[in-house]
């Protein structure tokens, strides 16, 4: 039974590999310029899970605008926000199969491909935005991205969202408050361990199903950035927020490697340029929208918001030390120490 399933999956992958080699470049050889036209353009699908007005959504649309312009209409980019095309559960697989050409999952959702991506979840590891940028634009982040090459995935860029904070329907001001509560997580064992260290339970729930899970009280709370909480309207279903900045939520923009490698030279050039410009746009926008969303959440007066003070932060960090003991080997000491130095 297992062998049959495996063989089936292998056949699908083989087939998709053959198809992929054929698509994108058409009959052309890599290195040549494209024969795509305005009438018969190359179609690129960009799927993601946040709203169209989130930084990721706006930057995906910016990439579309740039790519279509730079290619003189020879490329058409279709953007699919809000898990319309693929959600957390199936976007990676469909990228590998070549059914979608670009996705931009939150870093931690790559845990199944390389558990080191959970570096972003290590409690209170990244000091500030600057250290996050230095990490992703430097050697450590590059190495991590390149680890996806062997999985037929090419990391194109890091797009920002921001620091994560906790919310719940029960007050959250000190570590003891977490005891017995259950929180929604994005993915992975590190986040599970983080909540366990606080005496809380955790459940992985796709982003597209989180609002309902909070509304139906499947979980008591969640952790996310101001912008995701704002654009997903979590204040409607959450009463308390602790502004904690305990972890990062950023994105890796990914494309199918075989597909990308097979692109004609002129299209690849436009693609790289458009991605670079969209990345500059996205990073600046993420900072602005993060601030704006925090204001929106405060102004709505729907949640009681507490900002974590240094003394209490120390208490949380101490409680969460066990996460480092448990995951130092998985993430790698070199990587953790590298981030601490940034
Ligand atoms: C989440 O699942 O909470 C986030 O990763 C969603 C996103 O893409 O920002």
Image (cartoon, rainbow, N blue to C red):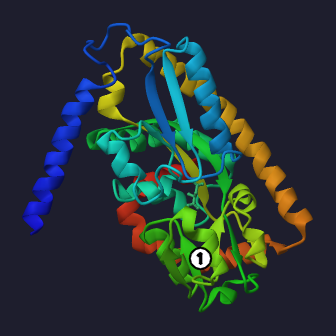
Image-quadrant location for residue 21: top left
Q: Where 249 falls versus 12 (above or below)? A: below
**Quadrant where the image shows the N terminus:** bottom left
Instruction: Note whether ligand 1 is within 8 Å of mark 1.
Output: no
Q: Determine the secondary structure under disc 1.
A: helix
Instruction: Write the residue at 33% across / 29% down.
Output: 259
Image-quadrant location for residue 172: bottom right
Q: Outermost residue, bottom direction? A: 180
User: Which residue is disc 1 drawn over?
Assistant: 213
Return the x and y of residue 321 as percentages of the image width and height: 53, 75
Instruction: Write the residue at 27% across / 12% down.
Output: 28
Q: Outermost residue, front direction? A: 39
Q: Quadrant of ligand 1?
A: bottom right
Q: Where 112 falls versus 268 (above or below)? A: below
Return the x and y of residue 273 as percentages of the image width and height: 54, 19
Q: Where 108 falls versus 165 (above or below)? A: above
Locate residue 333 relative to residue 259 in the image: left or right. right
**Residue 263 seen in this snapshot:** yes
**Residue 243 seen in this snapshot:** no
């Amino acid at each position: 039974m297992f062998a049959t399933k495996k063989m089936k999956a292998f056949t699908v992958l083989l087939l998709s590999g053959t198809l992929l080699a054929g698509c994108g470049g058409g009959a052309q050889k890599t290195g040549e310029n494209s024969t795509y036209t305005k009438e018969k353009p190359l179609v690129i699908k960009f799927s993601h899970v946040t709203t169209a007005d989130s930084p990721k959504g706006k930057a995906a649309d910016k990439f579309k605008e740039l790519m279509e312009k730079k290619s003189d209409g020879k490329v058409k980019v279709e953007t699919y926000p809000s898990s319309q095309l693929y959600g957390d559960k199936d976007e990676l697989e469909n990228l590998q199969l070549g059914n979608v050409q670009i996705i931009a999952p939150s870093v931690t959702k790559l845990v199944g491909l390389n558990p080191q991506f959970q570096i972003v979840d290590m409690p209170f590891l990244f000091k500030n935005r600057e250290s996050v940028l230095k990490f992703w634009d430097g050697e450590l982040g590059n190495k991590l991205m390149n680890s996806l090459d062997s999985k037929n995935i090419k990391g194109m860029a890091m797009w920002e969202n921001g620091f994560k904070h906790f919310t719940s329907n029960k007050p959250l001001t000190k570590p003891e408050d977490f005891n017995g509560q259950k929180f929604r997580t994005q993915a992975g064992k590190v986040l599970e361990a983080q909540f366990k260290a606080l005496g809380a339970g955790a459940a992985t729930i796709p982003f597209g199903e989180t609002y309902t899970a909070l509304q139906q009280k499947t979980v008591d709370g969640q952790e996310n950035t101001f912008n995701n909480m704002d654009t997903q309207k979590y204040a409607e279903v959450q009463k308390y927020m602790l502004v904690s900045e305990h972890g990062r939520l950023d994105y890796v923009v990914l494309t199918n490697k075989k597909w990308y490698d097979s692109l004609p030279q002129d299209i690849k050039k436009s693609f790289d340029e458009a991605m670079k410009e969209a990345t500059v746009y996205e990073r600046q926008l993420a900072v602005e929208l993060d601030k704006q969303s925090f204001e929106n959440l405060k102004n709505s007066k729907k949640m009681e918001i507490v900002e974590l003070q240094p003394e209490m932060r120390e208490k949380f960090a101490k409680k969460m030390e066990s996460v480092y003991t448990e995951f130092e080997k998985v993430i790698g000491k070199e990587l953790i120490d590298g981030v601490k130095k940034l």
